[in-house]
């Protein structure tokens, strides 16, 4: 569904500009057959998506929109964000830049879709025996069209009632699995401050 939405938006924006595919391909490093495949819903890397958005003169997120509207033809100078962390060591910055570049080159739209788009999560309380008694954790199971994934945070808090409330909140809000461990960390840090 996500790939079809993006494909439809790519095609509509290209047609609205009345620019030949070959001319657009020059600006985004895709061949004409690859562009045609993108318009038919083939999987793209994030770097390819950003290149397409740049030549179509839109932001990448606009290609995700369900309801197509006439494009806003403002020129986007750099579609791919320039990651500039506050680093004191240049080696750390170069490692970070390389990791971001690799992510853009390899992470695909299907990966994005499977990471949370349309997934349903089930959260359960789990018990972990500890030397000082019992600790309570959370078991999360995420199911989507792309399969399922299971995550466990076994030792979250010794207070069962607090963990049960947190499990209920997660069940209601259905956060993406990408944020599971961040949410656990925030919960633990907040609980320790009490």
Image: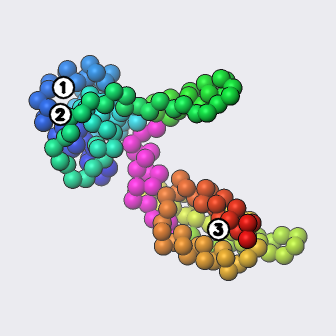
Up-down relation of residue 183 to residue 101 (above or below): below
Report x, y in % for residue 119.
Answer: 44, 60
Q: Determine whether, in the image, residue 91 is placed left or right of residue 57.
A: right
**Residue at position x 37%, y 28% from top?**
78
Q: Which mark is residue 138?
A: 3
- Please tell me which residue lies in front, 159 or 75: 75
Q: Which mark is residue 21?
A: 1
**Residue at position x 54%, y 73% from top?**
169
Q: Which mark is residue 104?
A: none
- Check disc 2 and report the residue beneath it: 14
Which-is-in-front pick, marks 1 and 2?
2
Inter-mark Cα distance, 3 to 2: 47 Å
Q: Mark 3 or 1 closer to N-term? A: 1
Quadrant holding the C terminus: bottom right
Where disc 2 sits, the SS reads helix
Q: Mark 1 near mark 2, Cβ–Cβ under 8 Å? A: yes
Inter-mark Cα distance, 1 to 2: 8 Å
Q: Mark 1 or 2 closer to N-term? A: 2
């Amino acid at each position: 569904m996500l790939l079809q939405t993006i494909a439809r938006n790519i095609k509509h924006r290209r047609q609205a500009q009345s620019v030949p595919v070959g001319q657009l391909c020059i600006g985004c490093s895709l061949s004409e057959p690859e562009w045609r495949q993108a318009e038919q819903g083939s999987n793209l890397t994030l770097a390819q998506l950003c290149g397409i958005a740049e030549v179509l003169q839109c932001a990448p997120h606009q290609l995700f929109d369900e309801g197509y509207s006439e494009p806003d033809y403002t020129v986007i100078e750099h579609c791919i964000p320039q990651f500039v962390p506050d680093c004191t060591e240049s080696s750390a910055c170069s490692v970070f830049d390389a990791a971001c570049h690799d992510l853009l080159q390899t992470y695909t739209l299907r990966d994005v879709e499977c990471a949370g788009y349309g997934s349903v999560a089930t959260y359960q309380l789990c018990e972990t025996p500890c030397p000082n008694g019992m600790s309570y954790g959370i078991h999360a199971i995420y199911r989507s069209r792309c399969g399922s994934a299971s995550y466990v945070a076994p030792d979250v808090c010794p207070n069962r009632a607090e963990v049960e409330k947190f499990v209920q909140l997660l069940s209601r809000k259905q956060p993406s699995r990408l944020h599971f461990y961040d949410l656990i960390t925030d919960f633990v840090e907040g609980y320790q401050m009490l």
